[in-house]
Image (spheres, coloured by chain):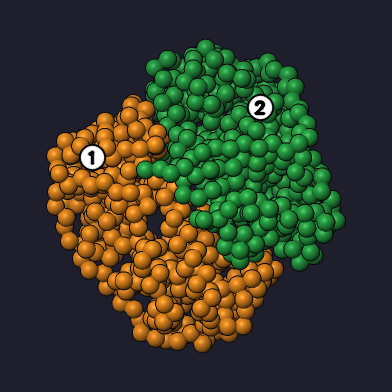
Amino acid sequence: MTPASRHTAFPLLGGVRVLIEESHDLPLVDLSFGFRSGSLADPPDREGATRLMARILRSGGRGSSPAQVEDRLADLGARLSIQVGQGSVTLNASVLSRNLEPLIAMIADMLLEPAFRPKDLARERRSTLARITQLVDEDRRLAGRHLYRMLYPDHPYGRGMLGTRRSVRAIQREDLVARWRSTLTSRNLVVGMAGDVDATEAERLLRAHLGGLPRGPRTPIDVPAVPHVRGRRARVIHKPERGQSQLLIGTHGTHFRDPQLYPLMLANTAFGETFSSPLVNRIRKQEGFSYGVGSRLSLSQKRGLFSISSFPSAEDALECLRIELELLEAWTERGCPAAGLRFAKGYLVGARGMELDTPEKCLDQRFGPVLAGLPESFWDDYIPRVRAVTKVEADAAVRARIHPKDAAVAIVGDAEKLVPALMELLGTDDVTRHAPDES
Amino acid sequence: MARNHSAPKVRAATSDAVPFGGLTLHRYHLSNGMELRVLPDRRAPIVSYQSWFRVGSADEEHGRTGLAHFFEHLMFGATERREEGELDRAFEAVGAEVNAATWTDWTYYYETCPKRALSRCVEVEADRMAGLKLDRERLLAERDVVLSERRSRVDDDVEGLAVEKLYATALEGHPYAWPTLGWARDIRRFDLRSAQTFYRRWYAPNNVVLVVAGDVSPTDVLRRVEAAYGAIPPSRLPRRVRKSAPAQRTERRAQIRFTTPTPKYAIGYRAPAFDDPDWPVLAVACEVLFGSRGARFPRMLVHEGELCVSARGHVTPFRDGGLFDVWLSMREDVDPASVLELFDAELVRFLEEGPSEAELTRAKSSLEFSFLTSMETVAGKAEQIGFHEAVLGDALRVFDRLEAYRTTTAESVRDAARRYLVSSQRSVVEVVPEVGS
């Protein structure tokens, strides 16, 4: 596939990696400033500190108020957001190209001179506590949160980025300053620009405005290995009034450097990633249980999540779960049919073109790996590697990585009925009931 | 069910080519009534293929609400040439993204795929326009799926439920009052005969605009489309007698109870039709009031006042006029009545003073920015063309709207706001939290 833009990359300013995808079709530039340290670096009793620090960056530098920041962004016709991941903090922005320099100047002010005013911390703390309260309305997120806690009980992956009411209340200004100092350094920084900008102009702008970024220590990407959790378990988030049940099944999956990565990606596509896959055919089309159903592999530094998600009616939830477990077991025991794997190869190879049709998407293909500490070319040989996977490799990868006997189940519904029924269906006493507002 | 057709007989009756955002849009009218729009854009080797049918939930009737959306699901079933499930498989085998959407005035089906799959798109879409097989078993299975979708989007979702109640309250007497998903009692009653009648009536070449954008040649697309669709006969489309909802003279109030931690409001002011000159002006007003974190209401109620967790506004792009709708979700221990008072007081100030020049400039920049980002991909361009053809009958109107944003003045925003954002033309749905589990 031909990418939609011209790519260049270069080092700058004591360790910053700069990636450019140049295209002048539209007068727009997408910007990404990614720092290689995220919520996993939150101190144990300060969960949510990285997210709070990142949100306060948006309040502006010492010379400006939050309202002035928002007015200035609007004046520039710019959009800006800050995302916190387990291993990164990323500031994304888009702007009309004629306003690129003032936007970069403004971002530099946010990153280099944050005020961390006590009133900004107090406001963002209240906002985060309100957000935690609102989570009660979001059944799928609630189920996801509990699934992670079951599968990663003593591991950083089991902690949320938002934090808990207790941890958020405990965070102090010095915690934020400490996270800012250790995260926002030039050695942690990856800059991406896509669209109506060239490498010369990008370099000039970054030198002019980000020269003051401290070099600092490079934060090691050091995630402990994921301990195997044996046996089945389940959590029921008690909402007896719900007409449908958010249902998640999860096991440990794969990671970026896993030799089984491509075989497992292909096998998952064949099993439940597409609309015509066996999982979707059975649960949605044959049984009519759930409008949405699918399986997903999350990629991480260490073994991330493999999950099956669906939302059957409350009456169908147990039967839906039974069939999904049956399909999961059959997949791991018997493997994928050869025709299914051929189909999955066609899907993944063909869909690759849709991942390269804008400069921003082309940038993502390189920016993501570099931010994760991987080679910029990590996805370059995607198509030949997908094509090279054999059925023997795919089946072996599923057997090696996916263990239905150790699956965890998170479900939102009536705990009075579901807890005893799940104990029987899963063959375990490890089924617990949880309130929706449990932090 | 299939409509037989033999060898293609129909040729493009008329054609022209017009500039479209730095590209050229080729327009064809086939003699069976079909409209074809082709936008060559060779930046990436992909194609977006979109079929926009001029039928939506506003074309339904009482007792059969949700049929347009339900039919969208059925269109992925078996045809004269394909078994159940083969359609998705055929597209996914080449990596295509395939889906569909239904709203009040339209239903559209799309594929975004590698350019080598163009012939597959043409063949499959022509096949399901003319040769869909409908049977009771398929209908029953899909009915359960649609009920699941409804539970997910409405029955178990506080915002979905409140907005459904808002439209039912505010637009009573007009088809826009019922949800595009349909009332659950109507979905449970769908039968084969209704589905067959709906298909015969609306799924025909003279009720569709086909948009093909991407790495294609217009003459090649035309040749393929003529060969595949040319012999499909037009249907006798019912004469549409559509008008605005009955006039509203006093504020309407409704309340729902839901297990949710905090109170919420869904508020709707009567808004003009999408082709009314007031529509873009009201869209600018909406941008001033709600368009960014620094806009009036998010700033006042969310970020500075800390009374709400979200404050959003939106003007519906409906053919017959819809709502300027507002969603306010409050924080814990906040009195909802006091939030509504503050909201009203700020709105009165806006109606008196209008936007400042700085607010107006920001709103216009933001709308222009949104327009540019909507045109980044071939699928985005095809969607703009299809939507404007389906609702306004002319793809080029997209640029008129952009120009209307640019020429809007503070006075015209204030005047439009004074005509529409008034309490006598608004409806308010209050969500009262219930103690749950």
Residue B228 is at least partly visible in this image: no
Percent coordinates x, y for residue A98 in the rendering = 68, 70
Residue A80 is at least partly visible in this image: yes
Residue A299 is left or right of residue B36, and the answer is left
**Where is mark 1, residue-wise?**
A419
Q: Colour of chain A?
A: orange
Q: Identity of the amino acid at label 2?
A: Pro
Q: Residue at x 54, y 27 (%)?
A: B182
Between A227 and A49, the residue placed more toward the observer is: A49
Q: Residue at x 45, y 38 (%)?
A: B156
Q: Colour of chain B?
A: green
**Where is mark 2, residue-wise?**
B175
Identify whether B340 is placed above or below A123: above
Task: Indicate the quadrant where residue A67 lies.
Answer: bottom right
Residues behind callouts 1 and 2 on a single chain: no
Alpha-carbon distance for marks 1 and 2?
44 Å
Task: Indicate the quadrant where residue B94 lies.
Answer: top left
Subunit that carries the residue with mark 2 = B
Front tag of 1 and 2: 1
Q: Identity of the amino acid at label 1?
A: Val
Between A438 and B276, the residue placed more toward the observer is: A438
Secondary structure of the residue carrying tag 1 is helix
Residue A245 is left or right of residue B147, and the answer is left
Q: Residue at x 48, y 40 (%)?
A: B258
Secondary structure of the residue carrying tag 2 is helix
Percent coordinates x, y for residue A393 in the rendering = 19, 49
Subunit that carries the residue with mark 1 = A
